[in-house]
Image: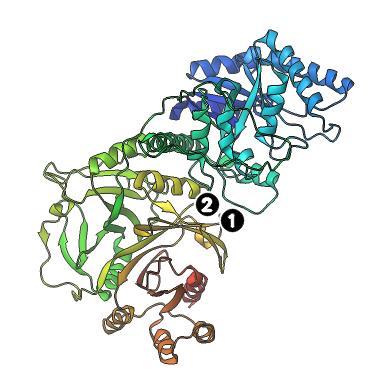
Amino acid sequence: MRRSIATVSLSGTLEEKLRAAARVGFDGVEIFENDLIGSVLPPREVRTLAESLGLTIDLYQPFRDFEGVDEDRLERNLRRAEAKFALMVELGVDVMLVCSSVAAQSVDDDARAAAQLRRLAETAAPYGVRIAYEALAWGRWVDDYRHAWRLVREADHPGLGVCLDSFHILSRGHDPSGIRDIPGEKIFFLQLADAPLMPMDVLHWSRHHRCFPGQGAFDLTRFTGHVLAAGYEGPLSLEVFNDVFRASDPERTAADALRSLAVLEDETARAREREEEPGRGGERPSRDGDPSGKAGRPEPSTRPASPAALTRLPAPTRAQGYAFVEIAAPEHSAGGVRAALASLGFRHTRDHRSKPVQLWSNGDVRVLLNATDPQLGHTWSGDAAVTALGVDVEDADAAMRRAERLLAPTLPRRRDPAEAALHAVAAPDGTSIFFCAQDPGDGQDWLSDFTVPVEGPTGTGRAVLGGIDHVGLFQPFDHFDEASLFYRSVLGLEPDDGVELAAPDGMVRSRAMSRDGAGPRIALNASLLGRGPYEDVRGGPQHVAFGCEDVFAVARAMRAHGAEPLRIPDNYYADLACRTDLEPLEVERMREFGVLYDRAGDGEFRHFYTPMLDGRLFLEVVQRTGGYAGYGSANSPFRMAAQRAEASR
């Protein structure tokens, strides 16, 4: 299917938006009226520019407050519409979006509204323009797509159809299954937007908090499946009002948008195949009830649906866990990182055959310590930082093919011909993601590159850790949703609902990504205000969390090695004693070793942190029991306060 994007979804001038959409591979655009009005180019030149870029102009929008008015106002509205139709001829676009009225002067009269919409379609016909009528979620009289379809059906004009917008339908909780009863040829346009679930006025929610498919909470796979089952054959188009997107680099936003559509198409195609499997039946949900009280039940279409072909992506190859985490540290900070790793039982076992990279191991847990920044084009402050993640996948080649189709930037690597041919892409924050085959074939075993033995024992070699539990990566605020979609689409990780944390220097948003609650887990964090110590030129804090069976044993061994955990205030343990039923001796032992505690159901979580190693990086040790699946986020504000106090000291 063709893919389109509304210019309102991108930042910049109209010309910049068109170029950004074309560069990443969109087929067409919706022209938002304000973008055209503010452009220095006349409509014919906008058309010429779009054609030169290989873009079609698929929709002109919006035309507001037309129907349900008296005769004098109707005539004025028709004159206004004719001027827009003439403009559309110059633009070369033949569909205009008409929103349901919010005007105070309009009246609740379906017969009048239908007749006036027919007049509009009759007026548009000589210009070769069709009218796509859309029910706004906050429409004064029409706020349900079923009501909009009833008016269109009653108007009965070939140039009048509906526009279906996922936000306007799903934000109001309307059942989208009734879309299947609208003839496909009467669905003139489809607009897609996701959104997080937020208890607020729907107009404010729509204007500021929409996001691309896969970045919010709406079931757009099911929604799109209904539209295509009805026989819709037009473009899949994104209309996303978002404050961050409209202030970000337009080409980067456009690439994120196209990635979201690619994933949505693929997931919709897979859902269709499952529905068509023998024995599954394709059962449809009930559509009883009508929130608007007006729409009625549309008559079912007698025309057989012929769903449009969908573009498939290579099958996802799910990430299974971490092969390694790589930390880049210049010499002035590498000593502190090495000391912290050694205190947790890691040993420096081997060096890379051609690069200044050390392999540190604790049983099967591996950390690479890099003396240089391995990320091409990544701004590095010189502080120690997590710069690469090695993830175990079943098929590294397949994972790379999918990543490339999802526009993930490929990272070229300089390597000796004898070294492993690893595939790597860049995450939105610049972190390198290496695909490591669980059963590597010839030339794919990354461990075979570490051939230089280290003379003499380095580190204690206590094998007390059980794996890399999770990695915490701070994100620039304007790339937070982009990162979530990247890890979901490229690594097959699913986001949790997320939390907002009150840090000493402002609010922090946190969202964990995992595979069914298991590894590889990634915690994405961002400053809500986009400034302060967590958003300076160095970037925010990062950490690597290691799992274990006995957090106190690790803390005790760490202290025996001469290192101390992050100091947690006594006030935390006084509060812990009064809000839990933990034994006093247990609470005292936690206080002694700086261990924090969380509980969910029957699951328990004990964890402690190292002090900051170089202003940005710290390590964590965690112990999960009883099926605990969280991250101890309730303790994060106290950890951040302790780090702030440590920095002051």
Nearer the observer, 434 or 614 = 434
Residue beneath disc 1? 529
Amino acid beneath label 1: Leu
Please report contact status of discs 2 and 1: CB closer than 8 Å, yes or no.
yes
On the question of residue 11 being in view, the answer is no
Above or below — where is 448 with respect to 577? Answer: above
Along the polypeptide, which appears first: circle 2 or circle 1?
Answer: 2
Q: Is residue 603 left or right of residue 171?
A: left
> What is the three-letter code of the residue carrying label 2?
Phe
* Element type at mark 2: helix
Q: Quadrant of residue 315?
A: top left
| Residue 472 appears in the rendering | yes
Q: Residue furthest bottom?
A: 585
Give how far across and how far down residue 552 sits, in percent: 33, 82
Q: Quadrant of the N terminus?
A: top left
* x and y, in percent, of residue 388 in the image: 31, 53
Within 10 Å of the Cα at label 1, are there few (<14), some (14-19), or many (20+) other Cα atoms? few
In the rendered structure, the answer to whether residue 195 lies left or right of residue 314 reads right
Quick one: SS at disc 1?
loop
Q: Which residue is mark 2?
A: 477
The image position of residue 31, as x and y in percent, is 61, 25
**Nearest the eye: 579 or 93:** 579
Q: Is residue 526 above or below residue 313?
A: below
Which corner quadrant of the image does residue 15 belong to? top right
Up-down relation of residue 200 to residue 232 (above or below): below
